Amino acid sequence: MTPLDPAAPPLASDRLVVATWNVNSIRARLDHLERFVGERAPDVVCLQETRCPDGSFPTAAVKALGYEHMTLNSRKGHHGVAILSRRPLVDAAPEQIASLEEARQQRARVPFAGALITIHNLYVPAGGDIPDAEVNPKFAAKIAFLDALKIWSPRVAAEGRAMLVGDLNVAPLPEDVWSHRQLLDVVSHTPGETERLLLVQQAGDWHDAVRAARPVPEKVFTWWSYRSPDWQASNKGRRLDHAWTTPDLAPFVRSVEICAETRGWERPSDHVPILVTFEA
């Protein structure tokens, strides 16, 4: 863990709350962000699918919520990531994991316990509707991104004290979907995707914070389709959003929450936030 001050104790008492959320348009759901941070008070918020150029990001409104520090990698369309923080951000920069010229990755270091941890905020391509890379360029791009992520993963994990969060658009385990059998041919849960994401996790020896808190065989979902007229009653969800840590940061995870209540708000995102609390 990179010290802020060489004389500072490496594990000073501290509490850090990190949220990750595919907000599905920051400008359309700024009121949701305001409500969420008002109720949950995270120190850091990692957003995906912000859907606006950096120059159109509602910077002043976000600062008014208490997030004076932010780093953006945004553009129009189904893209864009941002890290918002009440603590100073260090070494903030976009990352280029695959060859896609899209706003899908951002990293920054955040103070915690007298030192710095690195947060990697990712938005993996959705992959379209047809799980065949030969006929579907969107799915081919997704597979290429996951393959590149496997190469990237051990390098950044080796630096230690890191967290990987975001909409990874893959539900890797049978318990991460409402029906393993019925979704094996559906993009986000095909063997080609799930096997690759698990290899990414293994390559960096990443700790799955969500599954550590809510082990298999419990079903855990973070996404419910807009197509369902009653998402709560049918509960046909998938766990597409993830929060991983390197092994040296894992002992400081005190709680993990899936904030499913946001899916019931008016005009919601189809994804819900994950909230991870660290204590030292």
Image (cartoon, grey):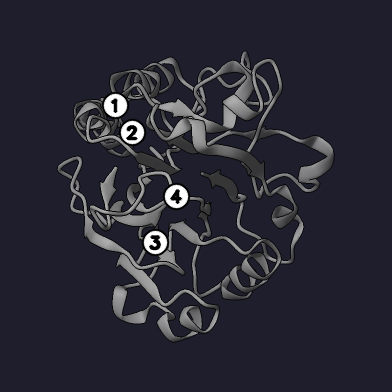
Is there a contact, CB below 8 Å, between mark 3 and mark 2? no
Q: Amino acid at mark 3?
A: Ile
Number of the front mark, 1 or 3: 3
From the viewer's perspective, tell me whether residue 112 is left or right of residue 75.
right
Q: Nearer the viewer, residue 120 or 172?
A: 120
Per the image, label 4 sits on a secondary structure element best described as loop
Per the image, label 2 sits on a secondary structure element best described as helix
Q: Amino acid at mark 4?
A: Ala
Distance (Cα) linking label 2 and label 4: 45 Å
Per the image, label 3 sits on a secondary structure element best described as strand
Q: Amino acid at mark 1?
A: Ala
Per the image, label 1 sits on a secondary structure element best described as loop
Say which residue appears at 62% left-offset and 64% top-offset: 41
Q: Amino acid at mark 2?
A: Phe
- State whether residue 1 appears in this view: yes
Say which residue appears at 58% left-offset and 25% top-offset: 212
Is there a contact, CB below 8 Å, between mark 2 and mark 1? yes
Distance (Cα) linking label 2 and label 1: 5 Å
Is there a contact, CB below 8 Å, between mark 4 and mark 1? no
Distance (Cα) linking label 3 and label 2: 27 Å
Q: Which residue is label 2 attached to?
A: 139
Distance (Cα) linking label 1 and label 3: 31 Å
From the viewer's perspective, tell me whether residue 190 is left or right of residue 4.
right
Label number found at residue 99: none
Q: Nearer the viewer, residue 256 or 268?
A: 256
x and y percentages locating residue 133 in the rendered image: 29, 26
Label number found at residue 133: 1
x and y percentages locating residue 154 in the rendered image: 23, 26
Label number found at residue 83: 3
Distance (Cα) linking label 4 and label 1: 49 Å
Q: Which residue is label 4 attached to?
A: 12
